[in-house]
Image: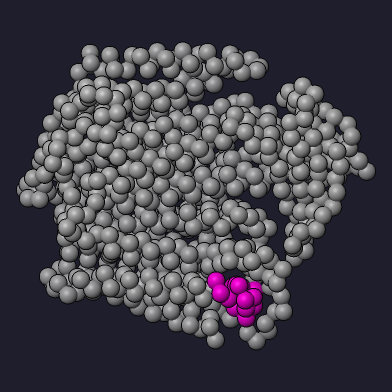
Amino acid sequence: MIPEFGQLSLIIAFFLALCLAVIPMIGSFTGRVVWMASSRSLAAGFFVFILIAFVILGYSFYVDDFSVAYVARHSNLVLPVQYKLSAVWGGHEGSLLLWILILSSWTFAVSRLSKGLPLDMLARVLSVMGMVAVGFMSFTLITSNPFDRALPNIPLDGGDLNPLLQDPGMIIHPPMLYMGYVGFSVVFAFAIAALISGRFDAAWARWSRPWTNAAWCFLTVGIALGSWWAYYELGWGGWWFWDPVENASLLPWLVGTALIHTLSMTEKRGVFKNWTLLLAIFAFSLSLLGTFLVRSGVLTSVHAFAADPTRGIFILGFLGVVVGGSLTLFAFRAPMVKSSSGFGFFSKEGFLLANTLLFFISANLVLLGTLYPLVSDALNMGKISVGAPWFNFFFTKVMGLVAALMGLGIMLNWKKTDFSRLRNWFLHPLLLSCWIGSFLPGVFPGEYSIPAAISITLGSWVILASLWDVKRKTSKSKSFTDGLTKLSRSYYGMIFAHIGFAVSLLGASLNTIYTDERDVRLTIGVAKVYAGYEYELIDVIRVRGANYFADVGEVAVRKNGKEVVRLKPQKRHYFSGGNVMTEADIDVGFFRDIYTALGEQLGNTDWSVRIHYLPVVRWIWLGALIMAFGGGLAMFDKRYKIRDEKLVVGDSEPSAEKRADGNEADAILEIGGEASSDLVSDLEPAPEGKS
């Protein structure tokens, strides 16, 4: 009977979402304050009933209620409890319910944390999020109901959760990734509300920035967790495969990164407002595209949830409505949005624009490589495979150019920069980074690598330029500490994000260049040397786990005759379904990982073993965490705090950047030719944000 309460909660939540989509929007047009104010209570009700449904589904897994078809397909009696609970989102229906729960959480958060928003704007924003919720709720109730019963033939035991998903990564990766995906619905809703109202100004950008930063941070961590999970779980030793579903998560991240930068320029300088609107629409649209790829059955991937064409058609139709409707609205309203501030070539605006275009170009290259094989197959043009060489060739070049411009752009002033002053600012970090880049590849074993020299130079350039800019901005203060305290959190967020990008760039490039990968035949008791390390297979024994038995190898790793570590990779055989999984064992280090994965038995004492020596692979994920930390730090800048239920739109004191650079920001913005009346405080430039 309990699952029926879950079904009832979903139905109630659907009607609340429908009311949220309609009533506040009508109220914003008719001026009915009560109707607009109802958006907060409707958002809260929607969240509560979705939460009830989600908890009931989780309880059904916990008590092994196999009368629920979804539970019967994705769980069994011997599945460990922690994986029973993560199995709630281990399949299509449950993961979709998780998506809706997170959407309701974002909706509720906006309703509670946006008291400084004008009521009509808040009503429109929440109404747009309600419209998105109606689409996903309809999808759930019509094609993907997680509470469908397996009656009358209730199985005594269930199926099984995919062994790939029986891992701690399953507990944290999907929720974090979905927080990022769905978080872009907030800035999308802000963009649509601005287009409807015609109110697109610096205040709008300032309202949107913390929500965009939050979504971007979650997505950054989610992608990093997915890469880390694939690295140690799949047994192949890589951290990115350019799988179509991996690409689906990267696409909104790339566009979201560009969006963060354009929001900064729109807020502070009143430029690129149309471009910011488009990026807000595209970021969420690409999140929906990822949902379509995962759930439509148009591709085969270890990440895909469903292969039901009916579901794919529904999502494709919903994607068409969202993208087509929002772009149509943009086409009608864009001529009313004007930017009134100019800038020179050597200016922060110019270089930020260049980098946002590069991020957008990289997203389009990834999108082309991901979709072209699908389109070619659908049009009977033959089956075409676009693999890692395509993505690596274009993507690495574009990201290298991003790094080169990033280090220079951070030093520039708004509007224009005197090149003679700029030359003095960047000369020292440029020379030092070139020296580091040319010197370090000679230290690594093997032949001197030109690609490694270029990568180290670019990564060092971004890090040194960022630190040099901090030094420059604090040089006129009474003391270094005093100067540091005067810089804003958003400025520090920018510094951390740029350094994190450089660390990830160094990790990815150097790992790709210097990795030593081998599939070898090891005989028990016989040592062999690879990449400067000696490997000896001591023994292979069979052990029993909670719901599997495993062959466990013991590999002694030595260097210069001294034992470094003993690794124990496994080959697991699961009871339910007979699935076989490889569990790698890794000796983790800051500068290198030693990675072993047990393969098949080749003889009485011979086994196939995959051995990888992976330099600085941890830097990839460390850099992602540093980037996310920077985004979070910028999100908590004091300009975004609510004081006395009014949004803070300016600081009483001139910003540290203004004191250092001496710029004046002419942030008088116009909409439809008329000056915005609520931007008096924006005549002063705000503290530095992400750039």
* Residue at the spot 44% in from the left edge and 38% down from the top edge: 626
> x and y percent of residue 536 in the render?
83, 33
| Residue 5 placement (x, y as % from top left) | 48, 82
Instruction: Decide if residue 306 is in sight here.
Output: no
Task: Give the magenta part as a residue range.
Answer: 58-72
Report x, y in % for residue 507: 53, 31
Q: Is residue 503 left or right of residue 283?
A: right
Q: Quadrant of residue 272?
A: top left
Report the front residue among 408 and 658.
658
- The residue shown at (18%, 50%) is 648
Would you say 39 lies left or right of 316 here?
A: left
- Quadrant of image for the C terminus: top left
What residue is drawn where x is 11% and y is 35%? 666
- Towards the viewer: 530 or 30: 530
> Looking at the image, is 517 positioned above or below residue 223?
above
Q: In this view of the protein, which residue sits in the foreground, 589 or 455?
A: 589
Please provide percent x and percent y for residue 126. Answer: 27, 65
Q: Does residue 509 sit above or below 635 in this rendering? A: above
